C-alpha cells in the first residue's frame, strides 16, 4: 500500500524566513497530494493541494511542488509569520482509493518572532 | 456555514469501559470519515461512509470498534471495551468533492 514519509519532524525558523517541508510517497499511481495545517487542539485544515498533472501551485505565501519521477512533493512557506506555527501534514491518495488519504507523520513548525 | 461538529471533545475512561463519539458532518456532505490520530502522528483512516453505507472499513478493529451512520447524516463511533492503546484523538471529517473538512476531534484517554 501507499506509504508517505515526511521530514523534518520539527522545524524552527526566524520570522520572515522561508520554511520547506518535504514528503516522499511510494505508490507511483497516487494522484492527489494535499497539505494540512493543524493548530493545537484543532482538527487538520486543508491549506493547499496539488494533482499529479501539475508541477507547482501557489497561493499567496504558500506553494507546493511535485516531482512525479522522484515521487516527492514539498511545501514552501515564504515570509513566515508567528501564526504559521503549527503542525503540518502531507498526504497522498493510493491507487485503489481516490478518497483515502495516507498522511505523513507531521512537521512541527515554530516561527520565532 | 457550520463545520463538522464532534462530541465530546474530551473523554477519560478506565480500560474495559465503553465509549462513544458522535459526529455531525457539514450539511450536504455525503461522505463521512472517522480517523484516529495517535500522539505525534498523522491521522489514520478507520472507516469511510458514502451516505449510510460503510464503503471502506478495512482499518477498523472490528472486535471492539463499531460505527453507524443511520439516515446518512450524523454518525457514531463506539469502542467496547476500551484498551489502553485506544488513547488517541478521534477525528471525523466530511466531504462532497474530495476535499476533507475535519472536526476538532474527540480526545480519548484510557486509564
Image (cartoon, helix red, strand yellow):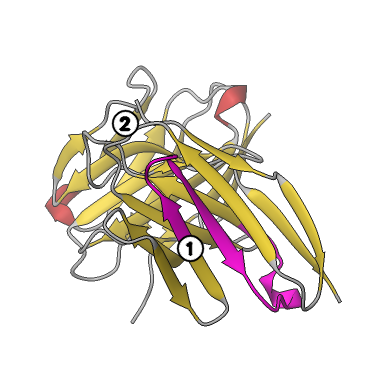
Query: 10 Å neighbourhood of mark 2: few (<14), some, or many (≥20)?
Result: some
Q: Residue A39 falls in which quadrant of the image?
A: bottom right
Q: Are marks 1 and 2 on the same chain?
A: no
Give the label on residue A64, or none: 1
Verify whether residue A21 appears in magenta: no
User: In this orientation, does residue A44 appear?
Assistant: no
Residue at mark 2: B66
Host chain of mark 1: A
At a point 57% along the width and 78% down the height, the residue shown is A61
Q: Which residues are magenta?
A: A65-87
Verify whether residue A72 appears in magenta: yes
**Residue A59: % across, % down:** 47, 78
**Residue A89: % across, % down:** 54, 51
Left or right: where does residue A6 sit relative to residue B97?
A: right
Left or right: where does residue A102 sit relative to residue A24?
A: left
Host chain of mark 2: B
Amino acid at each position: 500500500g501507499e506509504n508517505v514519509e515526511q521530514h523534518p519532524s520539527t522545524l524552527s525558523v526566524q520570522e520572515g524566513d522561508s520554511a520547506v517541508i518535504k514528503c516522499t510517497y511510494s505508490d507511483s499511481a497516487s494522484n492527489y497530494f494535499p497539505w494540512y495545517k493543524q493548530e493545537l487542539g484543532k482538527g487538520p485544515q486543508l491549506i493547499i493541494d496539488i494533482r499529479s498533472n501539475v508541477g507547482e501551485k501557489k497561493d499567496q505565501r504558500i506553494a507546493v511542488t511535485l516531482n512525479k519521477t522522484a515521487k516527492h512533493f514539498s511545501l514552501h512557506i515564504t515570509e513566515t509569520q508567528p501564526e504559521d506555527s503549527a503542525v503540518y501534514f502531507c498526504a497522498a491518495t493510493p491507487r485503489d482509493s481516490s478518497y483515502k488519504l495516507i498522511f505523513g507523520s507531521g512537521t512541527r513548525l515554530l516561527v520565532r518572532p | 456555514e457550520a463545520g463538522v461538529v464532534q462530541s465530546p471533545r474530551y473523554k477519560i475512561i478506565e480500560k474495559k469501559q465503553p465509549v462513544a463519539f458522535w459526529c455531525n458532518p457539514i450539511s450536504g456532505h455525503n461522505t463521512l470519515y472517522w480517523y484516529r490520530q495517535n500522539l505525534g502522528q498523522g491521522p489514520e483512516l478507520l472507516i469511510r461512509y458514502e451516505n449510510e453505507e460503510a464503503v471502506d472499513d478495512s482499518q477498523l478493529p472490528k472486535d471492539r470498534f463499531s460505527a453507524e451512520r443511520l439516515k446518512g447524516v450524523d454518525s457514531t463511533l463506539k469502542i467496547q471495551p476500551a484498551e489502553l492503546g485506544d488513547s488517541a484523538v478521534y477525528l471525523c471529517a466530511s466531504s462532497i468533492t474530495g476535499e476533507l473538512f475535519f472536526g476538532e476531534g474527540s480526545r480519548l484517554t484510557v486509564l
